[in-house]
Image (spheres, grey):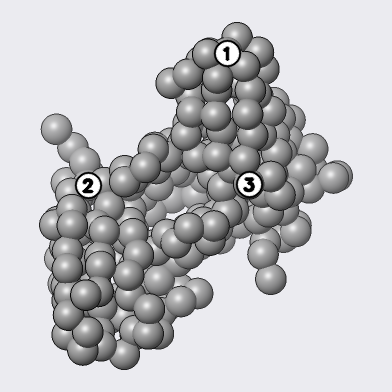
C-alpha cells in the first residue's frame, strides 16, 4: 500500500505562472517531508523540506505547504521557469531513523 | 568536493550473470541506501545500512545483495535471481540523524541483454 501518493503523473504550466504539485500521505507517523527534483538519467536533488511542526516553508521561488489534518502537502513554484521542467518527487520520513518513502513523482513541463 | 559517486553510469549484463554496482561517499554519512527507479514506479527501496557491518532489506530486496564493510562504500550486487533487473539504480546517503535529507548519486543504468 502506497504511503506517499502523488496522484498527478504530469502537469503542464506556462512560463511565469504558478506550478502547484500535490502530495498525500497515509502514515500519521510521518513528521518530515521533502521535495526532490529529478532530471532524466540523473540522481534526484533536494529542493525543500518541511517539518510537521510547521505549515509553511519558503525558499526563493519554492514554497511547501503542509496540512497535517488532511495529510496533504503541496509544492508551489512561482514564477515557473522552463528550467523547472523535471520530475518532482515527494518524500516523507517518520519519527524513527527510517529511510525516506517516496511518491511516484509528477512530471512538470513548463512551456515557454 | 564532497559527494556520492556511482559507477559505472551505464552497465550491460547478460542474463544469468551477477553484476555489482559501486557507490562511494565522502560526506562522512552513516546511513546509505539503494533505490531502484522504473518508469511510473517512483523510487523503491532495495536495501539500506545505518552503520558499518549492518544493513536491512527494503521493499524490493529479492534478487539483490549488499555489503557495508566501510563507512564510505555500499556496493549493490544484482544477482541472476533478480527477475527484472533492467532499471535505473540510485544510491543515496544521509547523516544519522532525524529530519535530514538524503543526497543522491548520479545513478547507474543497468540493462540486461
A45 w.r.t. B58: above or below: above
**For the C terminus of chain B, which image quadrant?**
bottom left
Q: Position of residue B9 (x, y in %)?
A: 18, 53
* Residue at 25% in and 88% down: B80
In the image, what residue occupies the spot 17% across and 80% down?
B14
Please state the total of marks drawn on the protein image.
3
Closer to the eye: label 1 or 2: 1
Q: To which residue does mark 1 refer?
A: A15
Disc number lying in front (3 or 2) = 3
Residue B34 image position (x, y, % from top left): 34, 63
| Residue that carries the numbered disc 3 in the rendered image | A9
In the image, A65 versus A19, the foreground residue is: A19
Q: Position of residue B16 (x, y in %)?
A: 21, 89
Q: Chain of mark 2?
A: B
- Residue A77, quarter of picture: top right
Image-quadrant location for residue A90: top right
- Is B74 positioned to the left or the right of B50 in the image? left
Q: Position of residue B23 (x, y in %)?
A: 19, 58
In percent of the image, x 40 and y 47: which residue is there?
A: B102
Secondary element under disc 2, as helix, strand or loop, is strand
Q: Which mark is residue B4?
A: 2
Relative placement, left or right, of B45 versus B1 is right
Packing grade of label 1 (10 A; few <14, some 14-19, many >=20) is: some
Q: Establish whether labels 3 and 2 are both on one chain.
A: no
Amino acid at each position: 500500500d502506497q504511503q506517499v501518493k502523488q496522484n498527478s503523473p504530469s502537469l503542464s504550466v506556462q512560463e511565469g505562472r504558478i506550478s502547484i504539485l500535490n502530495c498525500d500521505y497515509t502514515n500519521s507517523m510521518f513528521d518530515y517531508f521533502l521535495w526532490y527534483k529529478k532530471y532524466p538519467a540523473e540522481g534526484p536533488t533536494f529542493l525543500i523540506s518541511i517539518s510537521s511542526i510547521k505549515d509553511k516553508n519558503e525558499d526563493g521561488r519554492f514554497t511547501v505547504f503542509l496540512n497535517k489534518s488532511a495529510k496533504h502537502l503541496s509544492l508551489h513554484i512561482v514564477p515557473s521557469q522552463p528550467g523547472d521542467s523535471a520530475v518532482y518527487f515527494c518524500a516523507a520520513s517518520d519519527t524513527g531513523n527510517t529511510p525516506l518513502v517516496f511518491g511516484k513523482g509528477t512530471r512538470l513541463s513548463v512551456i515557454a | 568536493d564532497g559527494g556520492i559517486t556511482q559507477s559505472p553510469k551505464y552497465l550491460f549484463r547478460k542474463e544469468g550473470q551477477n553484476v555489482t554496482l559501486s557507490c562511494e561517499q565522502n560526506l562522512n554519512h552513516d546511513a546509505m541506501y539503494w533505490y531502484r527507479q522504473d518508469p511510473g514506479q517512483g523510487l523503491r527501496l532495495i536495501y539500506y545500512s545505518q552503520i558499518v557491518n549492518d544493513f536491512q532489506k527494503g521493499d524490493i530486496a529479492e534478487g539483490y545483495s549488499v555489503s557495508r564493510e566501510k563507512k564510505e562504500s555500499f556496493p549493490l550486487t544484482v544477482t541472476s535471481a533478480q527477475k527484472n533487473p533492467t532499471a535505473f539504480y540510485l544510491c543515496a546517503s544521509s547523516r544519522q540523524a532525524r529530519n535530514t535529507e538524503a543526497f543522491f548519486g548520479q545513478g547507474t543504468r543497468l540493462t540486461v541483454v
